[in-house]
Image (spheres, rainbow, N blue to C red):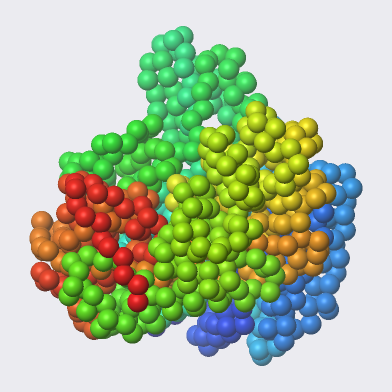
Amino acid sequence: MIREAEFQEGAALGAPDSIGRSRWVVMKFGGTSVSSRGAWEAIAAAARRRIDAGLRPVIVHSALHGISNALEQLLHDAVHGDPSEQLAAIRKSHFDIAAELDLDAEALIGDRLTELEQLAAGVRLVREVSVRVRVRVMALGELMATSLGAAFLAAAGLGVDWVDARSVLTSRSRGGAQRSRDYLSATCESEPDAELEARFDGLSDVVLTQGFIARNSQGDTVLLGRGGSDTSAAYLAAKLGARRLEIWTDVPGMFSADPKLVPSARLLAALRYDEAQELASAGSSVLHPRCLSPLEPWGIPLFIRCTERPDLGGTVISPVTDEVEPQVKGICVRRGITLISMDSVGMWHEAGFLARAFAVFSEYGVSVDFVSTSETNVTVSIDTAETLVADDTLEALQSELGRFCHVRTIGRCAAISLVGRKIRTIIHRLAPALEVFEEEKIHLMSQAANDLNLSFVIGEDQVARLVTRLHATIIRRTGGSQAFGASWERLFHGDIRPAHDPDAWWVSKRDALLAIADEQMNAYVYDREEVHRAASRLLALENIDRVLYAVKANFNAELIRTIDAQGIDFECVSPSEVRWLEEVIPDLDRSRILFTPNFAPREEYAWALEQGLTVTLDNLHPLRHWPELFAGRRIFVRFDPGQGRGHHEHVKTAGVHSKFGVPQFEIDELAELVAAAGADVVGIHAHSGSGVSDPDAWRNIASRLTQVAERFPSVRVVDLGGGLGIPEKPGDRPFDLERMDRTLADVKAAFPQYDFWIEPGRYLVARSGVLLTRVTQVKGKGEMRYVGVATGMNSLIRPALYGAYHEIVNLTRIDEAPSETVTVVGPICETGDRLGTDRLLPPCAEGDVILIANAGAYGHVMSSFYNRREVAPEVLL
C-alpha cells in the first residue's frame, strides 16, 4: 500500500517524467469532507504538507453534505408548494458551519443566498423550472461552500485564492434533441493549458475552486452531472499537467465490493485506468466514472484517500501495475437500470435495423449500456437511477421506436458485474460461483468486449444476498496478488483487538449471557435497560410530539410493558396485535393505538372502527367500495412520498413499486372520496422504509406531507412513520437523532398547527436483543471455512430473506483477536441458511457461545418451525 511518505513523492509507475516533475497537486474533497471544522482542519494540514514538500495544491470541493439534495427539493417545493422551509434549512446549514468555522456567513455568502431566494421566488411564480434556472440554483451549492472554505483556510494562515471554476473550465456542445444534457451533464476540454498554468502560478500557495460547475461557449453556467466534482478535478489536473490527482472521501479507496454489503471486502491497492473505469461504471460509488478519461492520455496518477483516516493506505490508479494475473478484482452493483426490449420478426437479416434503433437513442440523448441481440430481438439497458432519463423522454423514445418494432420495458433491474482482467480465460474457474444465479431470472448477460467484466442484469430485490455469496466464493480472503490490500474489517478494526463495539450492553453483561447459554442451547435475550435508553432518546426529541412503537417489530410481553412504562404509544397492523396489546396491558386506553392495516378485508376496518380505534387508510379501495364505513369517522391516510428508502428492496415501503400508500396523482380523487363518504381526515401518514440512515430524509418527508395536509383542513397530525437506522456493521455511525430534530425544527416552526409523530420499531428494540447459540461443528472446504451453530434461519430469517447483516461475536472468546474469516451457518437443510458470510472471528471450537447482535427486532416474531426445529426461546434481562 502507499503510505504518506511514498504518497508525497507522487510519481506512479508509467507516469511521464513531466508528470513526476510537476509541482501541481489537485486535491478534491466531497461534501462529507467539507462539512465540519475537524474536516477543514484536516484539509488545512494536508495542504500545508504539500506546500512544505514544494508542491502547489489546487483544492476542488463540493457543496456541503446534503445541500445538493436540498436544492433539488427546493426546486420541487417551489413548483408544487412553498419553498420557504427549504430556503430556511439551506441558510441554516451554511450559517451553522460558518459559526463552527468562526466565519461571518452573512458577509461571505449573503449575496448568494439572496440570489437563491430570488430564483426560488421566480420558479414559484411560474410553477416551472427552466434548465438554465435549475443550473443556476444547483451551482450555488458549490459557490457558497467554497467561499466559506477559502475564508477558513485564509484564517488558518494559508495563502489562498478563490477562483471561479467557470473561468477555468469550458464545456463542449454535443447537440441533438436533448440539448438540456449540455447544461446538466456537460463535458469539458481537458488539453494541457499553458495560459491557465501561468495564471495559477501568479496566485497564492493554495488555489481553491468549485467542482461540478463550468461554463459553455456562450458564457452560461453548466453542470457536470451529479457527482461531477471528481470530473472537475480531473479536468483541472489534465489542464495543469498535475503531478497527481487526489480524491479525498469518507473511504480509503476502492474495494472488491461495497463494504456496506460485504464488510470483508478487500481494499484494491493498485489499479490500471481501465480497471478503475470498469469498477466505477459498474457501480463502485467511490469515483465518478467520467473522471478517469481526462487523466489517462497524460498518465496522471489518481490517489484515493480517506479524510478521516489519512494514515490508511489508499488506492492508486495509474497506467500500469505490477500484477498481470487474470482475476476478478471487484463485484459491483448498479441499481436503477431499465431494459428496453425491441422485438420484430422483420429485423432478421434486415440491414440497418440497429442503426435505425440507435439513431433514435442518439436523437433523444439516451446513452445505452448493455446490448444483447438475437435474430428477432434486441435488448439494451439504460441508466434511470438518477433520473438521467426523464419520464417524458422515455415515453417519447418508446413511441419513436414503436414505429418499426414492438417495444417493452423492464424496470427495477440491477446489474451485478464481475470486474477484472482477462475474464474470458477464467470463466471455467468462475462456474461454481455462478450457481448463485440458479434460482434467479437473468434478464440479460453481457461479456465486455475489452474482457474486463462479466455482467448479469437481474431484478433489484435479491442483489445484497447474491453479492455477498459471490464475493465469498470468488475473492480470496487473504493473500493473492499485490493488487489486494486488507479487508474493510481489518482496516477499521485491525488484528490486535476484537471486532466488536466495546460499549455494547452485551459486553458488560457477558457473564449473565454465558450463564443463560449454560441453560439454553439457543435463546433470544433482551436487555430492558437498552430499551429504556432508546426510548429516552426518542422522547427527548423537542420537535416530535408523539412516539408510537410499531408492535410488529417485537411483541414480547415484557418488552411491550417496558415501552408502555416509558410513555410510548402503539401502532398495530392487525386485530390480533391489538388484542395482544390489550391482554398484555389490560387497562390500555385505545386512543393510544393507531391501527394501520394493509390490503386487509372489510371486516377488519369495520371491527377497528367499532372498537373506537384510529384507522389509517393506505389506498383508495376502502373509500371507493365501502364509503358507508367511514361516514362521520375521523381517519388517517397513508401517503406515498414517492421514494422508498432502506437497507433492502423488501423494506422500502414507498415508491411506485411498493404496495403501500396513496400516490400523489390520486390526491384529488382522495379528496373527492373523503367528501363523498362524509369522513374527516385528521392525520397524514407516511413510511418510506426501514434502516434509513440519513436524518435529512425525515425533513423531506415532512415537507411533502405538510403539502398534502394543506389539502385537508381538519388535519392535525403529520405522522412521519419510522425506519430510523441503527449501527449494524463495523464503522457504522449511530443515527444522528439530534440532527434529525434540528432539521425538523424549521418544519415545526412553519407549521405550528400540526403535531408531528414518529413510529419507530427497530430503533427501539433491535439493539436490545441478541440471539445466543453454540458452535456445533467447524468445517474447512478449500478456501471456505464454515462455523456451524445450533440454530439458523428458523430462528433468524433476516440474513436469508434480506441479505441483512447482523454482527456475530464469539462470546466465549470475546477477548481474543479475530484471525479467521468464516461463514456462519445453521442446521437447516437449505443452502441459504447462512447467518453471516465472511466474518472475522477468533478460531472457534465446538461448544463456544456465539452471539448474534441487533436481533431484537424482526427476529423471534418472524421465526418458524421449519425442519421441525424448535425456535429459540425468549429471555429478558
For the point 57% across and 34% down, the residue is 602
Classify residue 115 by image quadrant.
bottom right
User: In the picture provided, is 159 more to the left or to the right than 780?
Assistant: right
Determine the residue positioned at 46% across, 55% down: 580
359 left or right of 868 in image: right
Does residue 216 appear in the picture of this structure?
no
Residue in the foreground of this view, choosing between 633 and 818: 633
On-image quarter of the N terminus: bottom left
User: Between residues 197 and 79, which one lies in front from this camera angle?
Assistant: 79
Quadrant location of the C terminus in the rendered image: bottom left
User: Residue 233: x and y, percent?
Assistant: 58, 63
Residue 31 visible, this orientation = yes
| Left or right of residue 583, residue 123 in this image | right
Question: From what the image shows, is residue 263 above or below residue 79?
Answer: below
Percent position of residue 793, x then y: 27, 53
Q: Residue at x 21, y 59 (%)?
A: 791
